[in-house]
Amino acid sequence: MEETGFHPDLIHAIFKLEWSRRSLEREKNENPDAMDCEVDAGAGTSKKSRPMSANANALKLSSKLVNFSICAEAVQRAATIAEAEGIGRIEPTHLERVLPQLLLDF
Amino acid sequence: METRMEEDDSASELLRDRFRLSTISIAEAEANKSGMEISEPVMTCVADLAFKFTTEQLAKDLELFAQHAGRKSVNTEDVILTAHRNEHLAAILTSICNDLKAKEPQSERKRKKAPKKDDRDRGAVHIAEA
């Protein structure tokens, strides 16, 4: 499991990118409202100047979360369907059949 | 503005490719475990699914949870909280979290606050182990 899992640094880089994008979007959305509530805007800019970070254990844990919840689970469920059909190869149709329940579960 | 968007896009594409590679290796390992072959479209689908899950759901949830708690950094508790809809998964994550904490409970905390002290502590640990 350790060898094939995601590297926490990769997850961190993805998180950073997403968080910086979201903070940019928020800035855009809040700029028109900045005139209405000056106190909130002041608090907001101080928050944006320091972006969200994550501690090492949290990153390890979230890489495990993605690993278990999506990758491993999707493949295993599709494998069960393929096995029931007596086919030794997981095809897109098998994934299609497990996808709705998978998306509901996670 | 456009150039910034392009930079973002190229960065995210690079990350997506790296992410896809790891997903494919995980998917292959899982398929081998159950003695099945796995076709390529399935692997790319799973990779995209996992990437979307990470960026759109997980990153957003973690940010919001940490903000709600008034923190500037994401905690292990936030990660466990994102899995609260699936009790089994939450239980697995809690046990992994406990394992991680048991491995290095002190050095993890001190690394951020006092890096200099951390080195000394580590040295002490090594000597004790030796």
Image (cartoon, coloured by chain):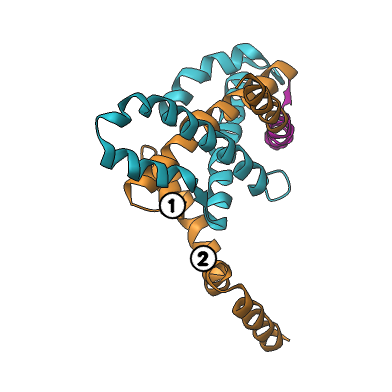
Chain colours: A cyan, B orange
Q: Are marks 1 and 2 on the same chain?
A: yes
Q: What element does badge 2 sit on?
A: helix
Position of B82 with respect to A12 (left or right) is left
| Residue B88 in view (yes/no) | no
Is B14 part of what is drawn in magenta?
no
Position of B30 with respect to B50 (left or right) is right
Residue lying at 49% horizontally and 37% vertically, measured from the top left: B59
Range of the magenta residues?
B17-38
Q: Quadrant of residue B24?
A: top right
Q: What element does badge 1 sit on?
A: loop
Give the image location of residue B124, x and y in percent: 65, 86
Q: Are the residues tagged 1 and 2 within 8 Å (C-beta)? A: no
Label 2 sits on what residue type?
Answer: Lys
Image mark 2: chain: B
- Which quadrant would the C terminus of chain B be assigned to in this image? bottom right
Q: Quadrant of residue B39?
A: top right
Residue ID for mark 2? B101
Give the image location of residue A25, x and y in percent: 46, 27
Residue B72, numbered label: 1
A73 vs A4, nearest the viewer: A4
Give the image location of residue A84, x and y in percent: 59, 19
From this view, report whether residue A35 is shown above or below residue B69. Answer: above
Report the magenta stretch's main SS.
helix
**Number of other residues with Cα within 10 Å of mark 2, as a class: few under 14, some 14 to 19, many 20 or more:** some
Residue lying at 27% horizontally and 42% vertically, measured from the top left: A39
Label 1 sits on what residue type?
Answer: Lys
Is B20 part of what is drawn in magenta?
yes
Give the image location of residue B90, x and y in percent: 42, 46
